[in-house]
Amino acid sequence: MKTARSVAHRSLSTALVATALALACAAHAQTDADFIAAKTAFERGDLRRLDALAPALSGHLLERYVRYWQLSPRLDSAAPEDVQAFFTAFPDGPLTDRLRVEWLKALGKRGDFHRFALDYPLPGSEDTELACYGIQYRYQRDGAEALAAAKPLWFTGTSTPDACEPLFTALIARGDITPADRRSRMRMATAGGNTRLAHAIAADLPAADRITAKEFAAVDRDPLRALRRAASRSNPPPDASSRSTRSSERRARMPAARTRRGANGAAGCRTPIATMATCASPITPHDS
């Protein structure tokens, strides 16, 4: 009888353990399914569905991803306490590093440089957008001398983040980004096929250097013809004026290579249309 009771007890214990394991596996499978559903909701931008799933994933091995998905799309309006709670719960790791960068950009966009300063600078390299927010912060703290760090960021044929625009505007107003610098970037943009940026820079040039949309189209249709027209405008006939005559005589005494450089380089680059057609050769930051 005792043996029978022992066997029955063991059988019951085994059944209970098996039931517990089955329930644990089912619960684990359910939380995994919830995690996949949360990921899908994030990718679809369904934050309401994501918020509804999040409590079931508290304590899950991948909980930090769910918390990140909830915070990242809302950083522009997120409460600092909510962001800091994430950093406290998950102080290290690539996801935390990514959120720190995104949070600093959100603070820069808000103009909240008091909180920005609490975490800036971050260790490691920074992209152009964060670099420009960093310069904005130093500009507010240190004054105009901080603007110098923004000038190298101007010289690119690609569009720059909105965070850089106030810095470039200030540099142009101070004369630290010159018309020659602006033409250089316009040529970089043209060479890189970024016509939208090239048009925007051209439209914002001083009146004497401005290039119209019609002139851009002319260069696209026939660059050589545009070059000839630019050269003719840059070099009027010798009898146009006595000054022009003397200039022609001086050019006649120059070595041939230097004369070509004067006709196609320095003189040509001073006409708006030739800024694209004539001066698309090697570009340097202070090309003129």
Image (tube, grey):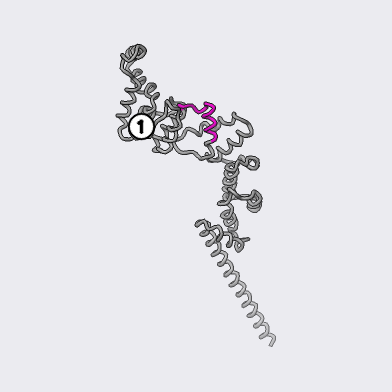
Residue 105 falls in image quadrant: top right
Q: Residue at x 51, y 59 (%)?
A: 40
Say which of 150 and 276 sits in front.
Answer: 276
Whole-percent x and y of residue 227?
32, 27
Q: Is residue 222 above or below residue 245?
A: below
Say which of 256 and 44 sits in front.
Answer: 44
Q: Please count the marks in the image.
A: 1
Whole-percent x and y of residue 202?
42, 32
Q: Is residue 151 visible?
A: yes
Say which of 140 and 127 sits in front.
Answer: 140
Q: Is residue 120 above or below residue 171?
A: below
Q: Residue at x 57, y 48 (%)?
A: 98
Say which of 15 and 28 sits in front.
Answer: 28
Q: Is residue 14 magenta?
A: no
Q: Residue at x 69, y 86 (%)?
A: 2
Q: Is residue 9 above or below residue 22?
A: below
Q: Helix, strand, or loop for circle 1?
A: helix
What segment carries the magenta color?
Answer: 166-180
Residue 32 falls in image quadrant: bottom right
Q: Residue at x 42, y 25 (%)?
A: 208
| Left or right: residue 262 compared with residue 105 | left
Q: Kindly identify the amino acid type of the residue bearing the numbered disc 1.
A: Glu
Residue that mark 1 sits on:
215
Q: Is residue 176 magenta?
A: yes
Q: Which quadrant is home to the C terminus?
A: top left
Whole-percent x and y of residue 223?
32, 31
Whole-percent x and y of residue 243?
37, 12
Q: Is residue 253 visible?
A: no
Q: Which quadrant is home to the N terminus?
A: bottom right
Q: How busy is the neighbourhood of tag 1: few (under 14 within 10 Å), some, or many (20 plus)?
A: some
Judged from this view, the residue extending furthest toward the right is 2
